[in-house]
Amino acid sequence: MGQLPSVPRVMKPSILVTKRVYSEAIEYLKTFAEVDYEATDDGLAPQELVERARGKQAIVSQLTDTFSAEVISRLEGVWVLANVAVGFDNIDVGAATSRRIAVTNTPDVLTETTADFAWALLMAAARRIVEAHQFLHSGQWRRWTIDLLVGRDVHGRTLGIFGMGRIGQAVARRARGFGMRVLYHDSVRAAESLERELGLEFTAPDRLLAESDFVTLHVPLLDSTRKLIGAAELRKMKPTAILVNTSRGPVVDEAALADALSRGVIAGAALDVFESEPHVHPKLLELDNAVLAPHIASASVDTRRRMCLMAAENAAAVLEGRHPPNLVNTEVWQS
Ligand code: GLV
């Protein structure tokens, strides 16, 4: 039995689902709980969040819901914040822990889907697929020419990966098929067996930046990773290099990146995440060498459906007094 209270058998728990999820998750939650749910994409502002959370034991949240220390201090009787995302930087986990609120996420299920998308972005930027698409759609294709939309080779090049967690590893695994050399950096070095299996070379950030043709980011957003890539780091990259970010926007200094792209400090960028979503730095929107996507790296039908169900299962576990499968703040649970 965990340290968190278990649900008295007579009571039907109440759950707030903050915004639209796949309907299977709602159907599942309704089998054992009262569900406060509106199938809208609007999300809840902090005050609304606090009000709608009243009388709820669980909240199924999304990365657009901000659970600051202030919001968390006003949650009464909530036992679990079940985030539908692997990232949980939208939640002040320390504040949740101090109020003994479990925080859960949805890892693993999105690893391969996100790695696929990081590669899709990398390839799109390297081979100028978005530019090519726009070129055709706007009726500009009149004749074939020798250097029409020439891009950069991917195969045989050097890939630099920041963050060798689950997604970083899945990205590295794919690089083997392209015969690439893979450099990586992480705060903790990977096991030798993994380095050997994936053909990884651990290196300092400066060397990774200087030698990589593609730099891809797979770190969580922490104080230590905020603006990991800024003006100084961009200057260390090759002028032919491409930066890919599918992690979190604030890991990159967006203004510095826009500036570097417009001045040719690096050749290109492919971004799925932004510092202040859905706002995108206006300069990035004007650049042909920036491929931009609206935070969709995990957005395959199967994966998004699984993520919703997984969050619902995490909420259910806590409400039933079971250790949730994906507990982030393990300290709240003492066996
Ligand atoms: C998406 O960005 C996630 O963290 O799952």
Image: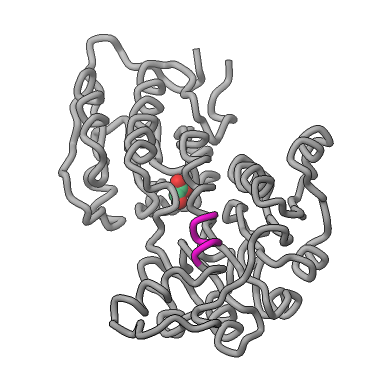
Q: Residue at x 35, y 47 (%)?
A: 62
One can see residue 69 in this view: no
The residue lying toward the viewer, choosing from 102 and 240, is 240
Residue lying at the far top of the rendered structure? 9
Q: Is residue 29 above or below residue 108?
A: above
Quadrant (top left, top right, bottom left, bottom right) of the C terminus: top right
Q: Is residue 87 above or below residue 36?
A: below
How is colour applied across the structure in the image?
one colour
The residue lying toward the viewer, choosing from 148 and 318, is 148
Residue lying at the far bottom of the rendered structure? 263
The residue lying toward the viewer, choosing from 223 and 72, is 223
Residue 229 position in % (x across, y down): 65, 69
Residue 308 position in % (x across, y down): 33, 36
Q: Residue at x 41, y 58 (%)?
A: 295
Residue 11 position in % (x across, y down): 23, 16
Quarter residue 250 falls in:
bottom right
The answer to whether 32 appears left or right of 310 in the picture is: left
Q: Residue at x 67, y 72 (%)?
A: 241
Residue 241 within the segment the image draws in magenta: no
Q: Which residues are magenta?
A: 119-124
One can see residue 323 in this view: yes
Residue 7 position in % (x across, y down): 33, 16
Q: How many marks?
A: 0
Is most of the magenta stretch helix, strand or loop?
helix
Quarter residue 85 falls in:
top left
The answer to whether 55 appears left or right of 199 in the picture is: left
The answer to whether 68 appears left or right of 240 in the picture is: left
Q: Residue at x 54, y 54 (%)?
A: 119
